[in-house]
Amino acid sequence: MKTSSLPAPQRVSSVDAYRGFVMFLMMAEVLSFGKVADAIPSSKFWAFLDFHQSHVPWVGCSLHDLIQPSFSFLVGVALPYSMASRASQHQNTGTMWFHTIRRSLILILLGIFLRSMHADQTNFTFEDTLTQIGLGYPFLFALGFASERIQWGALAAILVGYGVLFALYPTPGPYFDWAETNVTADWQHNLQGFAAHWNKNTNAAWAFDRWFMNLFPRTTSFRFNGGGYSTLSFIPTLGTMVLGLIAGQWLKNATISTLLIKRFLITAAILFASGLALDLLGINPIVKRIWTPAWVLFSGGWAFVLLAGFYYLVDVKGWKSWFYWLIVVGTNSIAAYIIAHTIDSFIADSFRIHIGPDYNLIFGQAYRTLVSGAIILLVEWWILNWMYKKKIFIKI
């Protein structure tokens, strides 16, 4: 008896546009709004742009802080479509698991490779976007086979368990050596009371890395991460990806667009309220750098809002052509990530050599990085657009 193949799910343009928006924000770092703001200290406009192109020191959120959680969220959104596509090709579970483990390892190794560029030796680090996703991806894939109830239960277990881990780790005592943390006892962003369990480089994740990171070859012993980032953040990052997994299932199974958008926005409101309540009550602060449970909830709220917005504009209103420039980036996100981390200086040097060392002074010294950054962005987008038209997509 002949069996017919299940139809492969179609790409969702709004997801590509949202992913493209996130990747474009990352690529736009070359515009260096901070240097323009420093050159024009009286301008509130450039100060505003500088804030939203930088990570907040500890508690809080800027637009730039939403790049990594959005990218992680979208990994979860894409998973139901990926699993359905492989099922339509009659792949068995073993084959799917082989692909999952391979993808996980590639993401981890690619993250380490990119962080090791221009270094004297391999920089074994596990806190960047790719390695964090790679570490959690097999667990996400396993949850892809589970019911939504189990997925919500797993999310709750991740958030509560991670919060308890930090809460049980002792805060610095009177004889604590602050020199081992790259933070002073009177740092203005240090939290007080119970929230102090989530202070920079004095927490459970920092303690874990002081053991784990020194298992790998290093020029000097690992003592702290200057930004306060940690390996164990992949656990709550998995929580962000689970939120995306649930959103992806809703999106894939939706039949009425207005009900789906309403569902997204109600979920966002609940996540916002939960995250803000934890922060304001001093139970758990909203800190992206160590991916606190409150951050998972708060940034997850933003992810649902942004997904709802792109879905409404691109898929419901049908304004796909308006977002073509983002879709080009979003459909080739791995290529965009690699390009942004490898050839930006090459492009800038090429213009400096062949056009002239002062080519970016056309609008004056204050806007120098803005001009060179804009040129880098245009060249990188041109490469991605060429790949898009030639149907060249880098997939893992």
Image (cartoon, grey):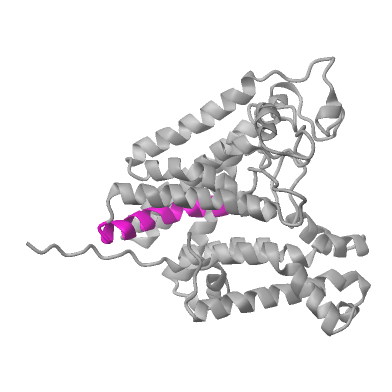
Vertical relation: 269 (above or below) 110: above
Q: Is residue 69 visible?
A: no
Q: Image quarter for residue 203?
A: top right
Camera-side residue of 317 and 86: 86
Q: Vertical placement of 148 versus 323: above or below? A: above
**Image quadrant occupied by the N terminus:** bottom left
**Front one among 41 and 102:** 102
Residue 333 in view: yes
Q: Position of residue 31 (x, y in %)?
A: 77, 67
Residue 5 place in picture, x, y as percent? 21, 64
Answer with left or right where residue 358 lies relative to residue 261: right
> Residue 312 at x, y = what percent?
46, 65
Query: In percent of the image, x 68 and y 77: which residue is there?
Result: 379
Residue drawn at (79%, 73%) of the image: 348
Q: In this view, does 153 lie to the left or right of 197?
A: left
User: At 58% across and 35% down in the image, what residue appears?
Assistant: 293
- Residue 6, horizontal then vertical, whole percent: 23, 62
Q: What kind of secondary structure does the magenta stretch mostly adopt?
A: helix
Judging depth in this view, the residue of 174 and 2 nearest the camera is: 2
Residue sitting at 47 percent across and 45 percent down?
Answer: 137
Is 39 left or right of 139, judged from the image as shown? right
Figure quadrant of residue 354: bottom right
Range of residues picked out in magenta? 68-90
Is residue 78 inside the magenta stretch? yes
Q: Which residue lies furthest to the left in this view?
A: 1
- 295 in magenta: no
Q: How many marks?
A: 0
